[in-house]
Image (tube, helix red, strand yellow):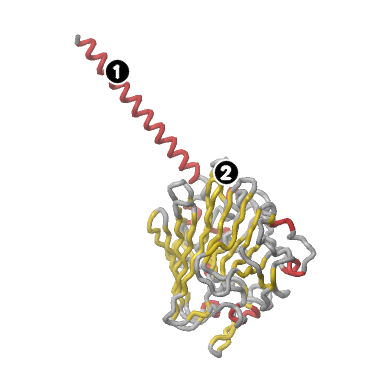
Amino acid sequence: MKTNLVLFLAAGILSLSACDSSQQQTGNSDSTSTDSTSNMIPSKANYQDTVEGKATDLYVLKNANNMQVAITNFGGRVVSIIVPDKDGKMTDVALGYEKLSGYQKANEPYFGAIIGRYGNRIGNAQFQLDGKTYKLAANNGPASLHGGPTGFHARVWDANQVNDYTLELSYVSKDGEEGFPGNLTCKVVYTLTDDNAIKIDYTATTDKATVVNLTNHTYFNLNGEGNGDINDHILKINATKFTPVDAALIPTGELKDVAGTPFDFTKPTAVGERVDADDAQLKLGKGYDHNFVLTNGDTTMKQAALITGPKTGISMEVLTTEPGIQFYGGNFMEGKENDGKAGKAYPFRTGFCLETQHFPDSPNKPSFPTTTLKPGETYKTSTIYKFTAAQQ
């Protein structure tokens, strides 16, 4: 009788042990899945440094679908965006560097950055406001580009990761910084939602009249970063007009119909279908590097663009409260060094940008939507990048 009882208890212990082992294996399997996604993100240690007396780091947002977004507070840059493709394979669709030092190189192409104080170009690197002329740094031929050589992309932002979904970044741009007037207090909030969308909310206030035009400069490749050019991507832009540019890529002030031009993306069209057409505007930008007119004053959230990478089936919808969107097809990319993530190079046209914005050179174009911000007012704008993939 005692022998039978001992055998019975031993069997029970073995059964419980097997059950526990099975549960641990299941748990490890889930952990491995999560870890495999995390392993696609550069090491935090590669981003932990001190720049101009302020600490830099890498912050990771996660949602319920195992989508992850990595952001550094150096320039508020989006480093990685990992989303599922049509087969459920996790794919990084954002171009970036393996280490912080990549973003500190001379002539670095603004990968993933918050752009300010003024996104895009200001002609002749100057503007007038309230009867006074403000001179800026000319860092793109005769123009000021993306807030100057040490714009917001090159500043360390104060970071507060609220939870797995939300990162708050703050920065105070001092009066006179890069030539712009007023102490500008800025806040940018990145939020990752459970429907695989990245929402970016920008706010700013000033103590002196100034101009503000903030945007994000992430380079995307929906076939996977470092996985060929983006000419096969299918793009739709909800704009019937664009702003033609001069030889310095400054808008002429005209709003031109896209109909009958290579700029007509009102129906889904391959990016590369007409990019090398014999068109004067395309030649000026060496391809697409132009502002598309979404609205004339409508500040409600609306779909600006939809683009799909055919190899992965990943689509990205862009929604915004902004009146314009800059489509840049990576025409100035060189990719001479293999210092991208996992040692990849990013050569000609292997990434694209869809930068929501007010129009370039608005401070010098009274007919364009104003970018002037005055004391007592709050600059407020939002953009959403939403990712989907039709499962096979």
* Residue placed under numbered mark 1 in the picture: 11
Give the alpha-carbon distance from disc 2 to disc 1, as whole Å: 46 Å
Is the residue marked by circle 2 packed among few (<14), some (14-19), or many (20+) residues within 10 Å? Answer: some
Residue lying at 77% horizontally and 66% vertically, measured from the top left: 279
Per the rendering, the mark at residue 23 is none
From this view, report whether residue 133 is shown above or below residue 30.
below
Q: Which residue is mark 2?
A: 86
SS at badge 1: helix
Residue 167 horizontal/vertical position (percent): 43, 59
Q: Residue at x 54, y 64 (%)?
A: 216
- Provide residue 267's location: percent of width, then percent of height: 66, 58
Give residue 348's position: percent from left, percent from top: 70, 57
What is the crowding at mark 1: few (fewer than 14 residues within 10 Å), some, or many (at least 20)?
few
**Callout 1 amino acid:** Ala
Image coordinates for residue 189, horizontal then vertical, percent: 44, 63
Report whether 301 appears left or right of 140: left
Q: Can the viewer see residue 18 in this picture?
A: yes
Residue shown at 65% from the left, 80% from the top:
124
* Point 52% across, 61% down: residue: 77
Give above or below for 49 relative to 37: below
